[in-house]
Image (cartoon, rainbow, N blue to C red):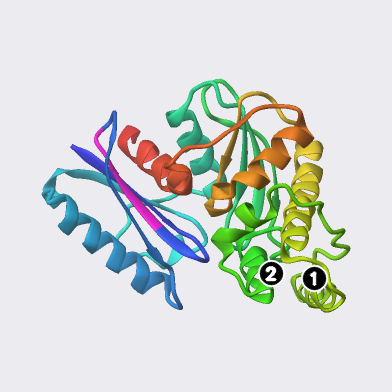
Amino acid sequence: MYSIGIDVGSVAAKAVIFDGKNVIAKKMIPTGWSPKESGIALYNSLLEHSKIDKNNIRMIVGTGYGRIALPFIDHKVTEITCHGKGAHYLDADIRTVIDIGGQDSKVIRLDEDGNIKDFLMNDKCAAGTGRFLQVMAHALEIDVSQLSDIGRGAEPQNINSMCTVFAESEVISLMASGASKESIAAGLLQSICKKTYSLVSRVGAESKVFFSGGVSKNLLLREYLSEKLGVEIITSEQSQFLGAIGAAVIGFKK
């Protein structure tokens, strides 16, 4: 028997198939304009790719902001709970999760069973999120994946605004005044580090600290956060699937 977890976020929709011990299949697609259509397409694609029989699926659990739009799921669970269970599945010693996604960021503290002890979420604006980095990378005329590489070793420029609109204007002004793209990239990542540190400080960090979400792929930001917090920050190739994994784990146990 299997369970399926589907996490429809603002930028990407992720899904996994879980057999009670291992994630045996996973898939991610852009969410696009319709969470419902993206979720249905993702579900059908995952089943086709895995070739499992629908009769062997015990439960489908949806999470993320688009979970309410999914007509085929059996159960809906908040993304905070799913991220906690997903982190606990990957490493039972994880006690703090820093998740920076496309449109929000969150810090979650867990107990020894992967249950939520405390959390704080910034979902009021795109400041410090993947969307923020995409807009800034566009202003720098580079791909968002290049920010880490070009910022490494540069002296960070001070970025005063975390508002996406004002920060974009600030980046353009800095380039016009002769600041290098390298120093601006480093400054942008430092500004996100400081904002994230502020969230973590209000919740409290306990080792181990896990970094999830699409922004966790930025190695320089991870290094900045580790230095700022004074702890090792770990991640995983499955970090973007953390919510979907947690949903599948919950579904298998129901």
Q: Which residue is mark 2?
A: 136
Q: Are marks 1 and 2 in contact (CB under 8 Å)?
A: yes
The residues bearing labels 1 and 2 have C-alpha atoms spaced at a distance of 8 Å
Q: Secondary structure at mark 2?
A: helix
**In the displayed structure, would residue 187 be above or below residue 200?**
below
- Report x, y in % for residue 224: 72, 41
**In the displayed structure, would residue 159 be above or below residue 89?**
below
Residue, x 51% and y 23% (percent of image)?
113
Q: Residues within 10 Å of mark 2 (few under 14, many from 20)?
A: many
Tell me which amino acid carries mark 1: Ala
Q: Quadrant of the N terminus?
A: top left
Tell me which amino acid carries mark 2: Met
Looking at the image, residue 105 sits to the left or right of residue 174; the answer is left
The residue lying toward the viewer, choosing from 222 and 156, is: 156
Q: Secondary structure at mark 1?
A: helix
The residue lying toward the viewer, choosing from 253 and 235, is: 235
Which mark, residue 68? none
Residue 159 within the segment the image draws in magenta: no
Q: Give the extent of the magenta segment.
A: 14-19
- Report x, y in % for residue 115: 55, 30
**In the displayed structure, would residue 127 be above or below residue 190?**
below
Q: Which residue is mark 1?
A: 167
Residue, x 18% and y 55% (percent of image)?
49
